[in-house]
Each structure stands twice: as structure tokens, then as C-alpha cells.
Image (tube, rainbow, N blue to C red):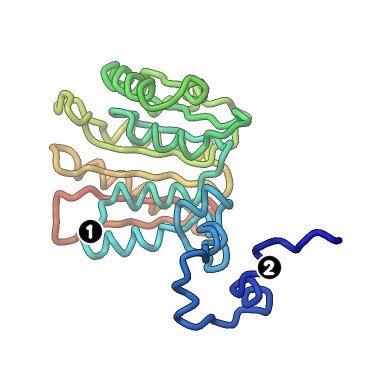
């Protein structure tokens, strides 16, 4: 005698499922023995834009997802300029890329950049610099607690002025992003600030090393003495870039005079 078919096929619900997407009557939908499809299947069918589906089944949205939301949040006062900057970075930077943190500070941007470039190949690199030893020490301590030793190997930190970035970034590197956070070290000596002269030199250096399709991101904190002068230098530099090879834009809260200003320079 041939073996009996699987028990599942004898169940009335299995017949309904095999016949197609016809909706079962309400009574049958409440039968305890019926198990809904696994969550992953539902996510794939409905193409839900959530982190769980991205991690389990691969990305289902474009890499730049999140930029629109961040910009809309900035316009409505619900998102900070730093959040807009990070969202734009994620739309530009890819795993294995080389990026530069021109002002490490306490390491928050360095950490964010590391997570964007790190993968199993170990090709990604983050070159970080800050003129203050305290900033380099703070960044290094933060990263050692936040990432594993394998990712830590991808970060190179240097206690030098950002105007000298070309001295530490290998000449054959295709730099996807150079990020600036201008002002003073949060929690540090507020009398030590970035200044227009070296910032202008750093922007010139960044424009030379960033690759086509890359980005220079400048977040300018203007609530300290000299902050407005530095913003003027950044805007002047952005305005001087040729329109056939660069796109320059600015995010600024007009009725909040000391709010940080985000300037983005995209190299075509």
C-alpha cells in the first residue's frame, strides 16, 4: 500500500492555499492549527521598508533611502543638520570606500563613517585628523569601546591640521567623502577653534583628493567668536567652484542665527 500523503495536504486549509489566493471564510481564519506565512515571506511580498527585512533578505530599498526623510525633518525642525549630513553620506559612501574625517572631535563622525565603509573585505579606510591631541585620544578611546579590533584596523588617526590631509591620504586613493565639523571640540577648550585660513587650505586639499562622484561635507558651527567669518570663507570657496564639475548647496535655519550651517559640495 502506498504511503499516505502528508497530513498538511489533508487539512482543508492546505487545499485552499493550493488553489490560489482566495480568502478563506472568517471561521477558518480563526482555526488555531493554521500558521501564517513566516514574517520574512510577508516582508518580501509586501516589500516592507524595514531594517529586519534588509538584514535577513538583503536591501529592498535604494542606498540613498532616508535622505528625503532627513531633509523633510530638517525643514520642519525635527531633524538636526548632522542627521541630514549623515543621511547624505550614506547615499554616497559604499562599503570598501576611502573617506576622510577632517575634524575628528570626539569620534562620532569617525564612527559613523567607519560603519559605512567597513565590510568583510577590509578594503575600507577612514583617515581621521584633528589638531588637538585630546580629540585624537577621545576618538581612539571611543572607537576601541564601540567597534571590534578588525574594524579598528580600518581607521588611521593623525594629530595634524586638516590642511595637511594630502600628507596622510595615499595619492592613489579614490576618496569618496571628506567631512568637516568646524568649530571647537565639544567638552574641550572652547578657545581652540578651527580658523578661516587653514579651513580654506583644507577645502582646497579636499577638492583635489575627492574622486568624481564624491562629496565634501562641511558642518559649520557659528555660535562662537569667528564662526561667521569661517562660514563666509566656506561659502566663498563653494561659490568659486566651477558649475560644470561641482554642485554646491547649503542648509541653513534663517530664523535661528546660531544654528549650525551645512554646506555640501558634490563633485560630478
Report which residue position mark 1 lands on: 78
Q: Residue 262: where, in percent of width, then height?
A: 31, 50
* Front tag of 2 and 1: 2
Which corner quadrant of the image does residue 129 belong to? Answer: top left
Marker count (numbered): 2
Residue drawn at the location 29% of the way across and 16% of the way down: 133
Q: Residue 8: where, in percent of width, then height?
A: 65, 64
254 versus 135 height, above or below: below
* Disc 2 and disc 1 in contact, CB within 8 angstroms: no
- Note whether residue 220 is visible: yes
The answer to whether 12 appears left or right of 137 in the picture is right
Residue drawn at the location 67% of the way across and 69% of the way down: 10
Choose the circle earlier in sequence order: 2 or 1: 2
* Residue count near mark 1 (Cα–Cα under 10 Å), binned few <14, some 14–19, many ≥20: few
The answer to whether 94 appears left or right of 1 in the picture is left
94 versus 254 height, above or below: above
253 versus 114 height, above or below: below
* Residue count near mark 2 (Cα–Cα under 10 Å), binned few <14, some 14–19, many ≥20: few
Q: Residue 268: where, in percent of width, then height?
A: 55, 54
Q: CA distance from mark 2 to mark 1?
A: 53 Å
What kind of element bears circle 2? helix
Viewer-nearest residue: 182 or 45 = 45
Residue drawn at the location 25% of the way across and 51% of the way down: 80
Report which residue position mark 2 lands on: 9
Which corner quadrant of the image does residue 9 belong to? Answer: bottom right
What kind of element bears circle 1? loop
Quadrant holding the N terminus: bottom right
Residue drawn at the location 26% of the way across and 64% of the way down: 75
The answer to whether 187 appears left or right of 55 in the picture is left
Amino acid at each position: 500500500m502506498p504511503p499516505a500523503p502528508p497530513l498538511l495536504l489533508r487539512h482543508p486549509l492546505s487545499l485552499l492555499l493550493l488553489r490560489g489566493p482566495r480568502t478563506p471564510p472568517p471561521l477558518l481564519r480563526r482555526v488555531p492549527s493554521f500558521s501564517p506565512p513566516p514574517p520574512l515571506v510577508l516582508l518580501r511580498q509586501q516589500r516592507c521598508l524595514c531594517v529586519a527585512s534588509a538584514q535577513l533578505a538583503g536591501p529592498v530599498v535604494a542606498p540613498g533611502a532616508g535622505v528625503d526623510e532627513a531633509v523633510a525633518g530638517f525643514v520642519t525642525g525635527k531633524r538636526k543638520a548632522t542627521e541630514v549630513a549623515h543621511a547624505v553620506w550614506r547615499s554616497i559612501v559604499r562599503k570598501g570606500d576611502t573617506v576622510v574625517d577632517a575634524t575628528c572631535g570626539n569620534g562620532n563622525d569617525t564612527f559613523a563613517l567607519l560603519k559605512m565603509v567597513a565590510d568583510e573585505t577590509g578594503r575600507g579606510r577612514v583617515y581621521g585628523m584633528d589638531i588637538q591631541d585630546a580629540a585624537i585620544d577621545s576618538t581612539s578611546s571611543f572607537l576601541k569601546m564601540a567597534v571590534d579590533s578588525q574594524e579598528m584596523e580600518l581607521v588611521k588617526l593623525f594629530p595634524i591640521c586638516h590642511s595637511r590631509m594630502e600628507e596622510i591620504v595615499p595619492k592613489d586613493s579614490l576618496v569618496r567623502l571628506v567631512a568637516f565639523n568646524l568649530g571647537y571640540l565639544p567638552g574641550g577648550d572652547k578657545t581652540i577653534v578651527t580658523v578661516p585660513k587653514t579651513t580654506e587650505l583644507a577645502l582646497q586639499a579636499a577638492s583635489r583628493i575627492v574622486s568624481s562622484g564624491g562629496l565634501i561635507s562641511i558642518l559649520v558651527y557659528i555660535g562662537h567668536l569667528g564662526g561667521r567669518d569661517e562660514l563666509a570663507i566656506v561659502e566663498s570657496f563653494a561659490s568659486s567652484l566651477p558649475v560644470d564639475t561641482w554642485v554646491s548647496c547649503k542648509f541653513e535655519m534663517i530664523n535661528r542665527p546660531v544654528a549650525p550651517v551645512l554646506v555640501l559640495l558634490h563633485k560630478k
